[in-house]
Amino acid sequence: MAGLTMQVNIVAADHPVWHGTAKSVTIPASEGGMGILPNHEPVLTVIKEGTIVVVDPDGSRRSFEVTDGFISFDSNKLTVAVERGRDVKMAE
């Protein structure tokens, strides 16, 4: 399964929001929605207020509401740094 997942770390200014392994992440980039998959080319971009959706290796989805910030992706490690962020409990 190596190469099919990436490490994700979502941090707000005053607390960690979530960290774990994912097979894909959708972010609210400043230019519009952007998907990140394992082995994506390195990227550093600004994000706007919106929802980050993380798809776990088992296919389940997690959503996080975030404010403005940025993401950095390199070597299958995605870091999301925002002013504020919170886990959104999704109804099944």
Image: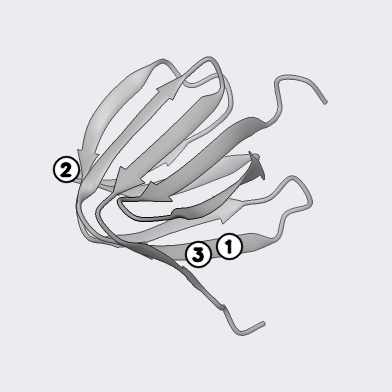
Closer to the chain start, of discs 2 and 1, is 2
The residue under label 1 is 62
Front-most of residues 3 and 73 = 73
Location of residue 14 (image quadrant): bottom left
Relative image position of residue 54 (x, y in whole percent): 55, 52
- Mark 2 and mark 3 in contact (Cβ < 8 Å)? no
Callout 3 amino acid? Ser
Can you tell which of label 3 and label 2 is closer to the viewer? 3
- Mark 1 and mark 2 in contact (Cβ < 8 Å)? no
Q: Which residue lies most toward the right here?
A: 1
Can you tell which of label 2 and label 1 is closer to the viewer? 1
Label 1 crowd (10 A; few <14 / some 14-19 / many >=20): some
Q: Quick one: SS at disc 3?
A: strand
Front-most of residues 42 and 18 = 18
Front-most of residues 18 and 3 = 18
The residue under label 3 is 63
Callout 2 amino acid? Glu
Q: Looking at the figure, which quarter contains the N terminus?
A: top right
Q: Which residue lies most toward the bottom here?
A: 91
Closer to the chain start, of discs 3 and 2, is 2
Give the distance between the C-alpha atoms of the residues marked 1 and 3, in whole angstroms.
4 Å
Relative image position of residue 82 (x, y in whole percent): 29, 49
Q: Is residue 87 left or right of residue 11?
A: right
The residue under label 2 is 31
